[in-house]
Image: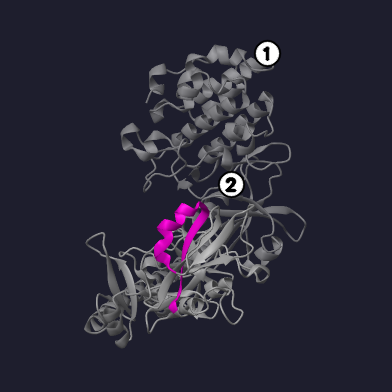
Amino acid sequence: MPPLLFLPLVLVFFAAADASLTACRNATCGAMAVVYPFWLFNSNSPASALDCGYPGLGLRCVNNTLILPFRTHKYRVLAIEYSTHTISITDADMEYSSTNSSCPHLHANLTIDDRSWLQLASSVSNITFLYNCKSNVSWASAWKLSGCAAGSGNSSYVLLDGGVTGEAYGYECETVVMAPVLDAHKKTMAGVFGRLPPENRSFGEVLSAGFQLTYSAHSDKCSKCERTKGWCGYRHNETSTTMDFTCFCEEGSTKSHCGAKGLKRKLYAIAVASSILLLCLLLFASLFTLKKYRSRKISNDAPRIESFLQRNGTIHPKRYTYTQVKKMTKSFAEKLGQGGFGAVYKGSLSDGRQVAVKMLKDPKSDGDDFINEVASISRTSHVNVVTLLGFCLQGSKRALIYEYMTNGSLERYACKKNNSRGGISLTWEKLFDIAVGIARGLEYLHRGCNTRIVHFDIKPHNILLDQKFCPKISDFGMAKLCINKESIISIAGARGTIGYIAPEVYSKQFGAISSRSDVYSYGMMVLEMVGARERNVDANSESSSHYFPQWIYEHLDEYCISTSEMNGETTELVRKMIVVALWCIQVVPTNRPTMTRVIEMLEGSTSGLELPPKVLLSW
């Protein structure tokens, strides 16, 4: 992403810091605005509710109607006059209908203590309702309510003077409720003593008209804040648990009004944004430089590889363009596998032969993986070595084209994890033939070629099986070419796969690196083949907690007898595979047999085949 594209993100980041507070002054319910000191419980603002207003002054918006949950009761908001600091409300739960207008049924008293943010306005006084009284009320200021009695002989009343409620309980009324009304309504009712309110207005209508409450919430500070284009709020003090008035400004919040502090915050925001932008520029420059370096590296590697191909023009196979590779794989439609080197795809040549196309990942530092593969495998021709049919070298696109192996890799049949998932289990005879075939292929690489080849990555994954399960050694990306038959090999760093790497490859204290390193990998692979084939070995048995070569050394006879076929010929095959493998994994390279000797032991009798020294297995 270009660095300039980060600038809008930075600006959005700083704008988001104030967006939640801006939402406080944009809260509405229906056509009514809700601002400081009130706030909405159900506001979509991500800000904390108390950032917008005072505790106890939270409103709810229900069906576009504002509701004030005050004390234990709910009141419907009729209007909010922010200029006079008044709010008009009415009882939201009052039972009142036009068919029973003379008997509004109230449920709760409105009591307000001096500590509340809300107080009754001076224009409001109380009237008292007495419901279902057993004794008649004879006060001059009491009206009898019709339609409210619940039992025979009982009556309900309304008293204009709220101060007599204590005496009202002596009349054994079921419910006594004090309700606030505007004084104008009370005086109107008092002037028409002896009958219902004038102008055909019922008590229910008078109560529905509501009453007023006043509030006082830092009005002087809020006025100063608003004059400086801020908006008022209320939030937790940073150093205590108290709540303080807060003036929110475009550039941040203060405790009084907007002004000089805003400039300082703007400069700070600009400095932070500039720093982030600079970091983005540096990151972009680094990525651009790296990409350019890699492109130059690829272009510098290409002449060296081309020079190699020209020097060995009589050896290397056919060269294909990247367009031809895409065509033979149908744009890489069928993927056969994935490895550290890259992906392998199925394809077809123009003559109909099926092939496996290995697309190499981004080339390594000097293109050695590609050269190793082409140089080494092009010098081979053996039934147990895979055939390289072609390659592609076009810019950064590098591909190797092999003959297609129908049965995939030995890993499918020689690994416990695959067998445990229901993989195909080969017979002991077939596993033995595969082990012999791999040995012959390695012997050819070590001694049969004009230039000796050490593979350095022998493992089940790199052994491919054709339609008749004939094994073929593949993947020569780590191979090393040696002119002298028994020369010691020098390599830079360890190469191979953990679990199959010979000890001397990663530590010189074990000995010199040579073709015996492949012998060690071969031995570990054969032991894995044996362990995966014999499923009678309990995963919870003693063998599961020990180094398997050590365990099988100590239980060789028992293990061979436990083979499922239970016949002498099979037992001999299994014993030969195990004993040969144990010789191959000796720690000291010179104690390991050559691949020629390995073949002799596999094809000979087990009568003269002795176990190697046990002590060498404990490293």
> Residue under circle 2?
380
The residue mark sitting in front, 1 or 2, is 1
User: Closest to the observer: 611 or 416?
Assistant: 416
The amino acid sitting under disc 2 is Thr
Looking at the picture, does residue 140 appear above or below residue 522?
below
- Residue density around tag 2, few if under 14, some if 14–19, many if 20 or more, within 10 Å: many
Marks 1 and 2, how far apart at CA: 40 Å
As rendered, which of 319 and 87 lies closer to the eye?
A: 87
Which residue is identified by label 1? 566
Label 1: element kind: loop
The residue closer to the viewer here, 79 or 467, is 79
Q: Is residue 498 visible?
A: yes
Q: Are marks 1 and 2 in contact (CB under 8 Å)?
A: no
> Mark 2 falls on what kind of element?
loop
Specify start and end residues of the magenta stretch as a single range: 161-183
Residue 24, percent from left and from top: 42, 75
In this rendering, position of residue 524 left or right of residue 343: left
The image quarter containing residue 271 is bottom left
At 23% from the left and 80% from the top, the residue drawn is 261
- Crowd around label 1: few <14 · some 14–19 · many ≥20 (10 Å): few
Residue shown at 51% from the left, 29% from the top: 523
Q: Mark 1: which amino acid?
A: Met
- 337 to the left or right of 187: right
